[in-house]
Amino acid sequence: MKHILLLGLFILFISNISGCTSQPKKTEEPTTKPNKIEENIDKQKSPMTKEQYKENLVKSYEKYIKPLDLKDYDDLENMLAKKGEINHEKFLNDLEEALNDSKINIKAFEESITGLEIDDAKLKNLNDKLVEECKVLMDDIKVKENEIAKIDENTLKKSTKDLIEYLKINLDDDITEKNKFDETLNQIEDILGINLES
């Protein structure tokens, strides 16, 4: 549904490789500051109603997760066929930046929904589970970052096709299969009667 799994980030990134101009290095600043979404709602003393929680969730999702929605980038092979050879070092540097940006946004989303008191017990349990799933996603990004850091000169000298195959094998061998982020978010959407993708 949301295609938040990071192989999707990898695919999005590949689709943007050709024709890119050099960008200045990004700092480790989130796209938007965490916990700045209506802190008066987040930190209120009485439990949130469903309506208040829905408002908070929608705002957080729009700021932090929606930019990572990769539903339009789901065919890696077709994209690769169009790209040809690329600068491998620049590609890996840009991929690391994309992973880091994702980690920052997921962390900001997690912080925006952590510790919320909600008057609906089932919704509260699902929200707490969603917080845990954010942690799993961030752990997964760290695994991918470590795999990229292990790439040696010999791998960098391979053809683009071989490098991509190497990355697909090594970056896809991760813990995302255990992650239930989308499933938990779907359950929350059902309770709230919303569709965060629309």
Image (spheres, rainbow, N blue to C red):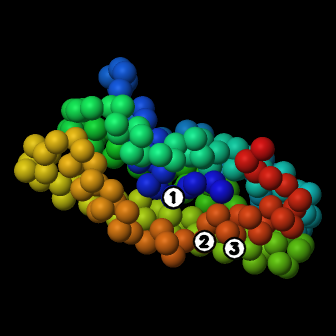
Q: Amino acid at mark 2?
A: Lys
Percent of width and height locating residue 83: 33, 31
Along the horizontal axis of the image, is 78 left or right of 166? right
Closer to us: 37 or 182? 182
Q: Residue 180: which numbered mark, if any?
A: 2
Q: Amino acid at mark 3?
A: Asp
Is label 3 in a helix, a strand or a loop?
A: helix
Task: Using the rendered image of the protein, determine whether residue 155 is visible from the camera's viewpoint.
Answer: yes
Structural crowding at the residue carrying mark 2, measured as other residues with C-alpha within 10 Å and reported as few (<14), some (14–19) or many (≥20): some
| Residue bearing the label numbered 1 | 5
- Lower position in the chain sequence, tag 3 or tag 2: 3
The residue sitting at 56% across, 45% down in the picture is 70
Is label 2 in a helix, a strand or a loop?
A: loop
Q: Disc 3 and disc 1: Cα gap in Å? A: 20 Å
Location of residue 98 by image quarter: top left
Q: Residue 96: which numbered mark, if any?
A: none
Q: Amino acid at mark 1?
A: Leu
Q: Disc 3 and disc 2: Cα gap in Å? A: 12 Å
Is label 1 in a helix, a strand or a loop?
A: loop
Location of the C terminus by quadrant is top right
Q: Disc 2 and disc 1: Cα gap in Å? A: 10 Å
- Mark nearer the viewer, 3 or 1: 1
User: Is residue 76 shown above or below 131?
Assistant: above
- Lower position in the chain sequence, tag 2 or tag 1: 1
User: Is residue 132 shown above or below 196?
Assistant: below
Structural crowding at the residue carrying mark 3, measured as other residues with C-alpha within 10 Å and reported as few (<14), some (14–19) or many (≥20): some
Location of the N terminus by quadrant is bottom right
| Residue bearing the label numbered 3 | 128
